[in-house]
Amino acid sequence: MEAELKARARLTPAIEQAIAAIPGADEQRLRKAQGHLDSLTKPLGSLGQIEAVAAQYVAWRGEEPPRVAKKAVYVFAADHGITDEGVSAYPREVTQQMVRNFLSGGAAINVLARHTGSDIVVVDVGVDADFESVAGLTHRKVCRGTRNFAREAAMTEAELNAALQVGFDLAAEAAAHGRTLIAVGEMGIGNTSAATAITAALTGQPVLALTGRGTGLDQQRCLSKAQIIDKALRFHFGDFDASRPDALEILRCVGGLEIAAIAGMVLGAASHGIAVVIDGFICTAGAAVACAIAPNVRNAIIAGHLSQEPGHRVLLESMGVKPLLQLDMRLGEGTGAVLTFPLIEAAVRIYNEMATFGSAGVSEACSQ
């Protein structure tokens, strides 16, 4: 609790006020939703996680009948100073190049957004490029990338709060547009290093066990990446107590602008009663920070998938969130999150349209 209060003290008053209003789990709604699912013409629990996500979505939204409306994926893009240390297989310029690819409709996330009938919102929160004249981009640049967290804090407190506010404001816009289900995605060369550092600091797990190959590092460079991250964490936090993490300070020192914006969007979505699907490792790092700041947001979060990054499983388990899919993906962009949209819609349709034992005149299971 002390760490939670300490972290909250650096939030802007507007975000603090909204967080305070985020409701906890409504056990009555959850029991009612589960009771309805149990009354449907099937053996109890036979639809597995489809039932779990239906109950979660219905209880969180509190609508009768529940519905999924105006789906969208928000892809947050930013650059990272830690790339100066050679932690990525790709050059920094790829971030801006991929943003242009998103805007021209040629990336995997564009294909999947079209396939699922979802809007895509591409947000420049910190790309090291001049995008002022670029049409179709949501311009929310805080600064042109973070600093190299191996040598100094990634962000100032003002930059951190500005990035959080970007996500928070876009969540408010999503609510104003009538969106009930959104996904978050990201693009930023070097951001697996930031996510790994956040994960190690939040969970206390050793950096080497959490460090994956990101965009395709070989074994030697992967080991070097882990050593750089470990050294950076000791530089910023010394022998810190991971059982009482200061989530916002961790985010400020070793995070990314897009990760902060994702944390802000998760907080904002929860404050507006929107269900939010998180993508892979980087998005989950932002969501984990949001949960550390405001534990009630956990009820709004659906985990899209389990990625190949070793730190992703650790983060999801620490949050108590079970992913819907496991497809050995590690692309990012929101791809794994958007792939779950049809499953969530199917879950809601099962809830709304499937006959009950009573309405169908089907005998229920015999009591033991």
Image (cartoon, rainbow, N blue to C red):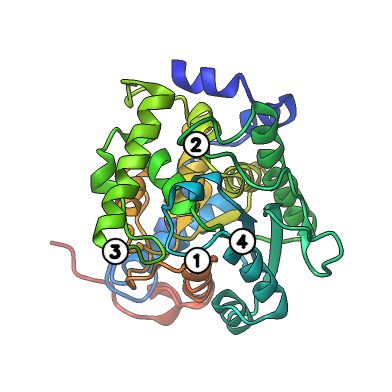
Identify the disc placed on residue 149: 2
Q: Is residue 364 above or below residue 290?
A: below
What is the three-letter code of the residue carrying label 1? Ala
Disc 4 target residue: 182
Q: Is residue 162 left or right of residue 233?
A: right
Return the residue nearer the eye: 88 or 318.
88
Q: Which mark is residue 218?
A: 3
- Report the number of numbered marks: 4
- SS under mark 1: helix
Q: Residues within 10 Å of mark 2 (few under 14, many from 20)?
A: many
Disc marking residue 337: 1
Q: Residues within 10 Å of mark 3 (few under 14, many from 20)?
A: few
State the CA–CA distance, disc 1 to disc 3.
27 Å
- Give the amino acid at mark 2: Phe
Q: Which mark is drawn over residue 233? A: none
Relative to residue 151, is residue 60 depicted above or below?
A: below
| Residue lying at 52% horizontally and 17% vertically, measured from the top left | 6
